[in-house]
Amino acid sequence: MATTQAWAQESRGSANDLIIRTVALTAADSARLTRGETVVRVLRTGYDRDVAIVGAVQVAAPRSFFMDRQRDFARALRTPTRTQVQRFSDPAVIGDVQALAVSADDLKELRACRPNDCNFKLPAADMAQFGATIDMAGPDARERVAAAARQRIVEYVNDYRERGNAAMIVYDDRGTVHSSDAFVAMLRDSSLVFSAAPSLAEYLLGYPEKAPPGVTDVIFWSRDEMPHLRPVLRITHESIVSPSDAAGSTIIAAKQIYADHYFEAGLEVLAASDRAVSGSGSPGIFLTAVRRYRFDHLPSGGLLNVRSRVINALRDNVAADLTRLKRESEAAWASASAERR
């Protein structure tokens, strides 16, 4: 605890302070962070189907420089685990999802989809529509299903922009789960976001109302691929803001509004807080990532221990992302500084 308090006193920015107080850093953790290494932990949650992961690293680059790079969405949204990514126009149009395809395996699983028994996270109405309007055994079934999925996604994104959480999908693949309810319950169980930046938390719950001053929003779809897991199609609403109630920090909050596998809800938060780089006094940031997900019913033991594989993949992904952001940001800042000289 003394080590945790000492690190928090050295840091700046309320979001950073809160995260440091939440994670019980050991002396070894503190030493690793000071050396510029990445520290990642899996946190306890109040619900057994929620998983929370926190990671931290210091970056020798100013916050303004780092955030300018993050607002370059064409580059920043592309990560090693995203094999496809595309921003939605406002309003969303079919061209935004033209690259989305349906595989032969996808089609085979969709043919068998029924409420409470489906390998895709879909509403019962969508399952019924596929079966009623498309000959699932026909020669053009894959393209017709893909076209219907593209149209449904465009309608969904435009509806979400207008009505926010009220438009979020109901999953009927295993029971009935309102993804908006899952997100609200997951967020409220994690007091971290509410405590670090209450105005941002209220915006995540009340979108499109209650927008913090200066917020930048983008909605995108991606196909995420991590080791030992099947690819996941996700639709994400990302907000970037420097909240007045989180001094010295800029926060990126990525709210999942759809995933076709595994996740009933998800929130990924990246906070960049001002701090002096250890040993130099130069401007830099303390970068923290807090990612929280609510799973559907995954096997958690024996040969089908899917839950452990997913948690390990998510933990490794946080570590890899923070290390990559540090490496790329510091290299870009060094290059920019050299050009100015």
Image: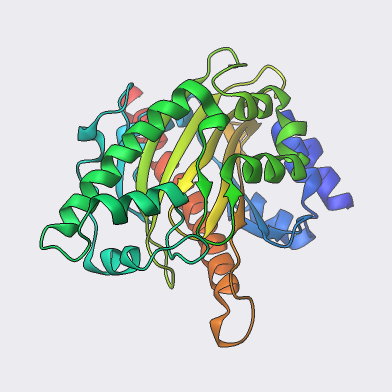
The extreme bottom residue here reads 303
Residue 62 appears in view: no
Q: Residue 283 placed where, x, y %?
A: 57, 29
Q: Residue at x 48, y 57 (%)?
A: 320
Q: Residue 69, relative to residue 148: is it above or below? A: above
The extreme top residue here reads 213
Q: Residue 131 placed where, x, y %?
A: 30, 56
- Between 177 and 65, which is closer to the camera in this rendering? 177
Q: Residue at x 42, y 47 (%)?
A: 125
Q: Residue 305 placed where, x, y %?
A: 58, 79
Residue 92 appears in view: yes
Left-right relation of 79 to 115? left
The extreme front residue here reads 132
Left-right relation of 334 to 276? left
Left-right relation of 310 to 77? right
The extreme right residue here reads 2
Q: Residue 251, relative to residue 39: is it above or below? A: above
- Between 153 and 136, which is closer to the camera in this rendering? 136
